[in-house]
Amino acid sequence: ISSRIQHEGLRQRVMTAEAAAALVPAGAHVGMSGFTGAGYPKAVPQALAERIGRLNAQGQSFRIGLWTGASTAPELDGALAKVNGVELRMPYQSDPQGRARINLGEMEYTDIHLSHVAQYVWFGFFGKLDVAVIEVAGILPDGRLIPSTSVGNNKTWLDQADRIILEVNRRVPAGLEGMHDIYYGTALPPHRKPIPMTAPDQRIGEPYLRCDLDKVVAVVETDQPDRNSAFNAPDAVSQAIAGHLVEFLSHEVSRGRLSPQLLPLQSGVGNIANAVLAGLNDGPFEKLSAFTEVLQDGMLDMLASGKLSHASATALSLSPAAQARFERELDFYRQRIVLRPQEISNHPELIRRLGLIAMNAMIECDIYGNVNSTHVMGSSIMNGIGGSGDFARNAYLSIFMTPSVAKGGAISCIVPMVSHVDHTEHDVQIIVTEQGLADLRGLSPKERARLLIERCAHPDYRPLLRDYFDRACRDAPGKHTPHLLGEAFSWHLRYLQQGRMLP
Ligand code: 0RQ
């Protein structure tokens, strides 16, 4: 038995993943650890998927409700989706098999703001949590848990579940101990108090997760790395987006609206976000800070170069090369990184107080600045809203980025009307594409439309957007946000019917 399991009683509860998976009843609500491919259980979900596949092949119907922090990995979301073992998934998933099931109508999906998940479970909005399956880096002699590479909703799952299954992963660097900050001061309305944090690097909690040991029904040992997908090297499009953004932030500094240290950065996931961080790493700003949910390669580079003084997040999402560097220089990074529960990393109160610069990618926006982050052509889910809404509405600066076109130019990412809306015109301040940046602050809808078309749309689509907007201004019954309702989705329809938005 691994020396990482230091509690005598819990050493007695070590068993195989198969034996642990057998303790999950059909129909259970199961809260699993995991956030953007980090800190998810690696053995029990696969054993559970095998069991579900076997039982379903025998004609029994066995499915679970699967709750997590955010996206996980093929060993969890992929394995369970493959056997059609998930009745309802929440709150964020990006697995291709899960996506396919959801879009075929075979799996239900509740896509909610990541900061809302824990409190909704505490409020009882989703019913009882039956089982928690949590990856940890170790168990202390007194039974407290050393968290793994993500914190996510683990505190809530441990507190709320009737039964707990722990996966102790010896591959997680032992040096992670001390990097976490678990806040136990949250209460339910009307008894809430202000969260005592006024700077992003402040510690307000404790480094370990508390755990009611009587609820632990199984401990499973694992030795597997996180998903750790590699990023693409920044391409010309994402470099251009990063360039516009750095220029804009420099302009804000010169106008006195930001200091040269800017304000704490929040950065979404993906290749564009990573390229923007690379742009900031080469940019003129010093002594930056981050208050974000996912710490990816770009931020690690910025910490290493000293551009970034410290970073607060709920998960690490590193490529294999960055992970190796992180482990090699763990003492350096432990001084500069703090990992928190996602209800704190994404908390609206803190985002508003600290005044963040929120930078997230999107699928499309419309000429009036409404943003779609989640749906393709109105009805198919891509991933989910994740934390983008938590940050967008409450940030000091709310920035959304996208290439101006997708699918080799067949799709314009600037459209007359978004086919789904995640962030309304009221929550969106700045739009950036490789074509340019539109600063929408303080503008009326029609002013926003003119700027977005001229600055951000691809030249192939600009004349069509101008034509739509001009005719809408002339013919729409209302002149505040002019739309031609019979035509507003014609671009999406044309893509669905003909494979391209251009006529
Ligand atoms: O699909 O790979 O099949 O070609 O969408 O697009 O350009 O690679 O960009 O990886 O940054 O993802 C919004 C999806 C962008 C992501 C989104 C297609 C495109 C490609 C991916 P293919 P790119 P990214 C913090 C914040 C919501 C959650 C969030 C996301 C694929 O950033 O999920 O912000 N965000 N969380 O071809 C049809 C369009 C399209 C399109 C792009 N207009 N129509 N398809 N694509 N634009 C993190 C968390 O909360 C955990």
Image (cartoon, rainbow, N blue to C red):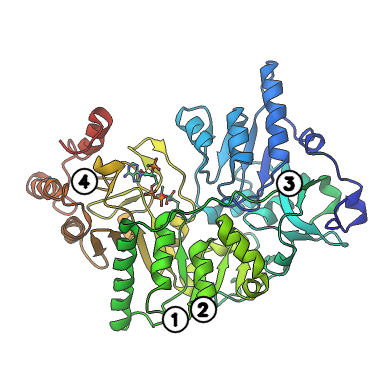
Earlier in the chain: of badge 4 and badge 1, it is 1
**In front: 324, or 18?**
324
Element type where label 3 sits in the image: loop
In 3D space, how far apart are the residues under numbered discs 2 and 3 (Cα atoms)?
41 Å
Earlier in the chain: of badge 2 and badge 3, it is 3
Report the amino acid beneath label 4. Pro
Q: Is residue 27 visible?
A: no
Q: Position of residue 425 (x, y in %)?
A: 30, 56
Residue 203, quarter of the rendered image: bottom right
In 3D space, how far apart are the residues under numbered discs 2 and 1 (Cα atoms)?
8 Å
Marking on residue 161: 3
Which mark lies nearer to you, 2 or 1? Answer: 2
In 3D space, how far apart are the residues under numbered discs 4 and 2 (Cα atoms)?
43 Å
> Callout 1: few (<14), some (14-19), or many (20+) C-alpha neighbours within 10 Å?
some
Q: Are marks 2 and 3 in contact (CB under 8 Å)?
A: no
Which mark lies nearer to you, 1 or 3? Answer: 1
Q: Are marks 4 and 1 in contact (CB under 8 Å)?
A: no
Which residue is disc 4 drawn over? Answer: 416
Q: Are marks 2 and 1 in contact (CB under 8 Å)?
A: yes
Seen as rendered, the residue at the extreme top is 59
Which residue is disc 1 drawn over? Answer: 286
**In front: 234, or 117?**
234
Q: Is residue 97 visible?
A: yes
Which residue is disc 2 drawn over? Answer: 306
Residue visible at 25% across and 34% down?
Answer: 495
